[in-house]
Structures are given as C-alpha cells and as structure tokens.
Image (tube, rainbow, N blue to C red):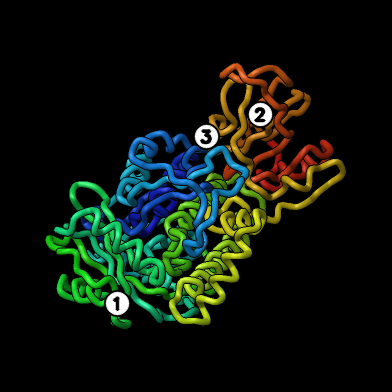
Amino acid sequence: MFDVVVVGGGPTAAMLAAELRLHEVSVLVLERDPEPTPVVRSLGLHVRSIEVLDQRGLLEPLLDHGTRHPLGSQFAAIPTPAPAVNTAHPYILGVPQPVVDRLLEHRAAEAGAEIRRGSEVTGLAQDTGGVTVELADGTTERARYAVGCDGGRSTVRKLLGIGFPGEPTQTENLLGEVEVTAPPEELTAVVSEVRRTQLRFGIGPIGDGVHRVTVPAAGVSGDRTPPTLDELRTRLIAVAGSDFGVHSPRWLSRFGDATRLADRYRAGRVLLAGDAAHIHPPLGGQGLNLGIQDAFNLGWKLAAEVVGWAPDGLLDSYEPERRPVAEDVLDNTRAQTVLMATDARSQAVRRLVAELAGIDEVNRRLTEKIVATAVRYEVGGPGDGERADLLGLRMRDVPLAGGRLYEHTRTGRGLLLDPRGALSVEGWADRVDHVVEPAGGTRVDGAARDVPPTVLLRPDGHVVWAGGSLVALRERLTRWFGAAT
C-alpha cells in the first residue's frame, strides 16, 4: 500500500511526487502514455515557477536549456517595457515543456517515487481507510490518498462525479512543429505584417531546422482529431498569404479556448491539481505554471497529513487558497481573448487597455497577474507589531551572510528567518528550520547586505508571521505546523 497515488505523468504530477518524497511519503505515479510526449505544449516558465524551482534546487539545470526573455508585453501581447517586479528572477525562461517534464520526472524518480508508464486508470473507489485505484489491465493499487493530475479530460475528476462548468471552445487554432522552405527573411517580414492584426498567428524556429507554427482554424472542429498537413497549408495561405513551404511535420494538433473550473478540488481522500481542476486558453503561457504551483501548495500539506503532524484544516486549505488563483487566471485569459480578437469593438478595447498599460503601475499589475508574484493567501493576522505588507505573500529570494534565502529552502520544511538570533523553534524543530542571520556585514560577493525581515515561512515560501509578538509566533507555528512536541 502506498501513501499517495498520483494519476497522470505531466509536470504537475511530477512536481507533486517530488514534493511528497521530500517528506518520505511513498508515492506511485500512474501515467497512461507508455512514453513521454514530444509535444511542446508550453514554451516557458514564469517568475513564480522559476522561484519554486529555485527553492528546491532545480533551477540551475534548466537555465542551461533555456533563454531569458524580458517581462514586458506579457498581457495580451500588448507592447510594454519590462516592469519592476519584486523578484530576484525578473525574466521569463524560454524552455520547451518536454525539458521541464524530464527534469521534474527525474527528480521525482531520484527521490524515490515509483513511476509507471502505460498504466491507465479506469476505476476509483474510496473508504475510510484509503483509495483503491483500478487499472485497465485488471490490477488494482491501494493508497491512503490519491491525486488526479491527469489533464483537462481527467478520468479521476469524471470518476468522482465532480462537475466542470464553464464555456466550451469558441475559437480554435492549429498548432504544429514543421520544417519550412521559405527563407528566414520572408518569415520575419510576413509574421511581422500579419501579427499587426492577427495575434493568433505565428511561426518561428525552435531548433534543429524545425519551426513552431500556430494559425487560426477555419472553425471549431468539435473533436481532438489532429489537422492534416493540407489543412494547415490551407489556413496559412488564408491568413498569411503563403504556406511557407511547410513539410515533414513532427506533430500537428489543434487547441481551443475552452474555459472551465472544477466544482471542487477534493472529494474525500481524492484531490485534483493542474488541468484536472482548471482549463483555459493558453494566452500568457500560464497553464503549466499554474499546475506546478498547485502541486507546490498541495505537496507539503498532503505530506503533513500522511506523516501525522498536520493541524486541523491544513489539507482543507488547499482549495480555498488555490481556487481563487485559478479563477483569476481564467478571468485574465478571457480578457486577453477579447483583447486579441480582430473585430472593431475588441480592437477598440485593446487600444484603451494599451493606453492604460502605459502607466507603470498598471503595467506592473497586469504582468504580475501572468507571472503570479502577487498571489496572496489568507494566513491570519496581523498581530501587534507585525508587518501586514508581508503576510500571505511569498518571500522573494534575498542574500544572506552565507548565500541566499532559497538555498535554505531545499528541504521542503518551514523556515524561521531570524536576523537577531533572539527566537526559537523549540517544539517544532522537526518541521521548521531556524536560520539565524547576523545583522549588517557584507554578502558573499562582498557587497553590502541589507538586514532581511524577521519572518516565518511555510514550506511553499509564503509568510505566515512577520515580526510580531512571540505569542503570535507560537500561535502561527501551531496553526501551520501542528502541536509542539
């Protein structure tokens, strides 16, 4: 019997499995597909996901495979300069999803998660002691909890009978990776001209002589049948006046702008994360990032429940914290869909929003919606003397005497950052690390070092106490990390 069965093998599932293994929770990952997909569904990581990977020591390997892009022009592709975002990683990391998938899966397996490919889940039953998962080959697996990370057409969600209300696809795009015969200068000129009015069109190199192409479909197909190469050529000619000599497709697909949100994220011992809980148009590239961040929020809470130190209501806090984040992403992609439409009314709205985005504060706010740095959870307080401006927000990386804050978060435990060395985590030392930061001085690179704030961080890096009274500190330790031992 496993502690947790994770259904699905994408980045959300792998991130969750890796997080659970930090706490020695036994994990079985069941993925239907026998081999990893080569399909590049996502092209990059946003600031908060970059921070998450840095917090767990996973960022450096990705930097070698990615390209850093400025933060400007993230919302509906409205041209804006890069705003000042409160982070040590003010960039978008362009990296194909298969690279992210491989890294996360390798980390999960290396940490001890069992990953089985070619294992399709067909049934699910739960009782007071756990969850029984039925597989297509007639075998079953038993676990204390299960998590559905199996995508927008989630089998787990359907087996649970959880509703998935929202809007069906209204516009559809063709997507693929192909080779072309058109010279680079022609591609650049045509793409620049067409995208003045049609922002759903694009074609550009992604390496190895292959180009990624996206173009509006003629209508909504109503199914998931991949388009033919001839259909892609026809649409390219209709939209761009040329098919660019596309040939030798590596893969072809179609995607729509359906927008849906699960009625609930939990049913008994089974939870949902990633696309199983929410789907939306890919505008702003938020889908993969949202799933990774779901897993980051859920992992330590589910582990605490399994291990036995979770305070009452900790696991139940997953949905009220992550559902509003998903609602905001669904709303901002709905808005971007309107802003990128070609009709006169939508274009009028786009011009107005573009004018407002020229205001620095507006530009920063719109960018933060995409990169998820302004997500704030309800964590209690503030008490006397606490910094209300920090509570509930994630803590950005800051330089410390011996390195960086994020270098102290690799364990997946809580962390008390104590610049004066006057505090203690006695009673919670098995769940919370205590980092004493000598005041003043210089950083390891010789530069002057600011004194960091006095804060208590959850394992996901969000601030739950910010320099208030010792009574409040103990209350927050108990609230988020259980009773003292």
Query: Of all residues shown, which one is farthest toward the right?
Result: 384
Quadrant of the rendered image containing residue 396? top right
Q: Residue at x 34, y 76 (%)?
A: 172
* Horizontal relation, residue 174 to residue 382: left or right: left
Q: Residue at x 63, y 64 (%)?
A: 356
Q: Is residue 461 left or right of residue 76?
A: right
Residue type beneath disc 1: Ala
Disc sitting over residue 434 in the figure: 2
| 407 displayed left or right of 442 | left
Which of discs 2 and 1 lies nearer the camera? The answer is 1
Q: Which numbered disc covers residue 175?
A: none
Q: Secondary structure at mark 1?
A: loop
Q: Position of residue 75 (x, y in %)?
A: 52, 61
Between residue 25 and residue 150, name the one nearer to us: 150
On the question of residue 31 being in view, the answer is no
Q: Nearer the viewer, residue 199 or 394?
A: 199
Q: Quadrant of residue 234?
A: bottom left
| Residue picked out by circle 3 | 411
Q: What is the C-alpha distance between the residues marked 2 and 3?
A: 12 Å
Q: In the image, is residue 372 above or below residue 158?
A: above
The amino acid pointed to by label 3 is Thr
Q: CA distance from mark 1 to mark 3?
A: 47 Å
Helix, strand or loop under label 2 = strand
Q: CA distance from mark 2 to mark 1?
A: 56 Å
Q: Position of residue 65 (x, y in %)?
A: 33, 39
